[in-house]
């Protein structure tokens, strides 16, 4: 046995009863009454795909494209919809739910490595700099080399990983998690259960400048950004994402918004509750995005536009006008053989020319 093998961490171990309890917080288990006491005590060590799961793991079927792998899976437990449950092999336990994917999501929480005890006492690393005027709730954890400014408020159970920097007067809610090198600008406010991943910047200065005649000679006059960023509850912000504070009013991210890595959100943008924004999207200043929208990867939205509730923008879409009706919108050109693309571009340029 190698030295690395000898120090590898033990895998988490939970029972099927634990899994059922986690799932039923979000949705009922339709065959729960049919599961035996012996089945509920099955010990599980992780989650795997249908074709790779071991006899001590959970798997799930969400996409019918993978249904062919279900009869031969070795998984101890399979999360399935009612119409697929008959294909679960006899050596596996079927857990029948309306949404197997949501059930899988609930189960993953049981196998997440827990670095800190959520019920632990407040902890401040000796290298952290915490202002004497900061107010900390119960069970707050502040990691190495963090900086917490004057009159900052941090809610109970919130964890700051290494090198988090929080400027004065910011308010952080309960049970938030800020990963290493997160920056929180002054006066930023966020609700409970907000998760911000490494390197994100929330509340930094927006991109605001006034031109002074010939900018090559006279340059630009910086516009001081006087607003805040206000974030709701259960918001997720990905690594290296930047959310600028408002110029005069506030930049607003409502409840249950999820934001991927490397997203730029300009000053005074408002993002409606339940919206998802994928990586590399760029949203210019003063855009208003409705509720339950889906913004694909690489989407660009020009400034001062409005996007209605329930809009889906597929990857690489460029939005230059407001969208007033829900639906799916696209503008990116999908990949094709290079010669076909060149011929298409020749025709596209011809369409743009004036008639003689």
Image: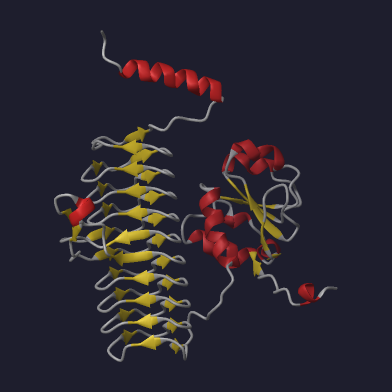
Q: Determine which quarter of the picture holds residue 81.
A: top right
Whether residue 269 is visible, yes or no, is yes
Name the residue located 43 percent from the left edge and 39 percent from the top edge.
Answer: 315
Name the residue located 76 percent from the left edge and 44 percent from the top edge.
Answer: 72
Quadrant holding the N terminus: bottom right
Outermost residue, right side: 1
Judge whether 308 appears above or below 337 on screen: below
Q: Determine which quarter of the picture holds residue 4.
A: bottom right
Horizontal arrangement in the rendering, residue 310 relative to residue 103 (left or right) = left
> What is the x, y in percent for residue 283?
31, 49
Judge whether 96 appears above or below 14 on screen: above
> What is the x, y in percent for residue 314?
41, 37
> What is the x, y in percent for residue 346?
43, 18
Judge whether 324 appears above or below 51 on screen: above
Horizontal arrangement in the rendering, residue 320 relative to residue 61 (left or right) = left
Judge whether 130 appears above or below 289 on screen: below
Name the residue located 41 percent from the left edge and 79 percent from the top edge.
Answer: 157
Q: Nearer the viewer, residue 298 or 330?
A: 298
Name the residue located 36 percent from the left edge and 60 percent from the top edge.
Answer: 242
Q: Determine which quarter of the picture holds residue 260.
A: bottom left
Whether residue 209 is visible, yes or no, is no
Horizontal arrangement in the rendering, residue 63 relative to residue 88 (left or right) = left
> What is the x, y in percent for residue 135?
30, 86
Outermost residue, front side: 217
């Amino acid at each position: 046995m190698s030295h690395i093998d000898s120090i590898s961490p033990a895998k988490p171990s939970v029972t099927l009863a634990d899994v059922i309890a986690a799932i039923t917080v979000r949705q009922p288990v339709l065959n729960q009454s049919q599961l035996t006491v012996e089945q509920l005590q099955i010990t599980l060590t992780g989650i795997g795909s249908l074709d790779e799961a071991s006899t001590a793991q959970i798997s799930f079927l969400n996409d019918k494209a993978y249904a062919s792998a279900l009869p031969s899976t070795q998984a101890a437990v399979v999360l399935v919809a009612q119409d697929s449950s008959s294909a679960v092999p006899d050596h596996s336990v079927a857990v029948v739910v309306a949404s197997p994917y949501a059930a899988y999501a609930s189960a993953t929480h049981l196998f997440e490595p827990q670095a800190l005890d959520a019920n632990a006492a407040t902890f401040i690393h000796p290298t952290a700099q915490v202002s004497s005027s900061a107010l900390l709730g119960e069970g707050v954890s502040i990691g190495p080399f963090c900086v917490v400014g004057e009159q900052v408020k941090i809610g109970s159970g919130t964890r700051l990983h290494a090198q988090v920097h929080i400027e004065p007067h910011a308010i952080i809610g309960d049970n938030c998690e800020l990963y290493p090198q997160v920056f929180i600008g002054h006066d930023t406010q966020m609700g409970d259960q907000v998760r911000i991943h490494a390197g994100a910047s929330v509340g930094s200065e927006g991109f605001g400048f006034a031109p002074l005649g010939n900018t090559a000679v006279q340059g630009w006059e910086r516009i001081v950004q006087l607003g805040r960023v206000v974030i709701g509850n259960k918001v997720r912000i990905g690594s290296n994402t930047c959310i600028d504070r408002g110029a005069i009013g506030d930049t607003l991210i409502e409840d249950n918004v999820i934001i991927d890595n490397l997203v730029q959100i300009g000053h005074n943008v408002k993002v409606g509750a339940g919206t998802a924004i994928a990586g590399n999207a760029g949203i210019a200043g003063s855009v208003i995005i409705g509720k339950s929208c889906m913004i694909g990867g690489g989407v660009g939205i020009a400034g001062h536009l409005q996007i209605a509730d329930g809009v889906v923008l597929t990857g690489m879409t460029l939005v230059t006008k407001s969208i007033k009706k829900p639906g799916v919108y696209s503008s990116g050109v999908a990949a094709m053989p290079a010669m076909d693309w060149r011929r298409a571009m020749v025709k596209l340029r011809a369409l743009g020319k004036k008639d003689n």
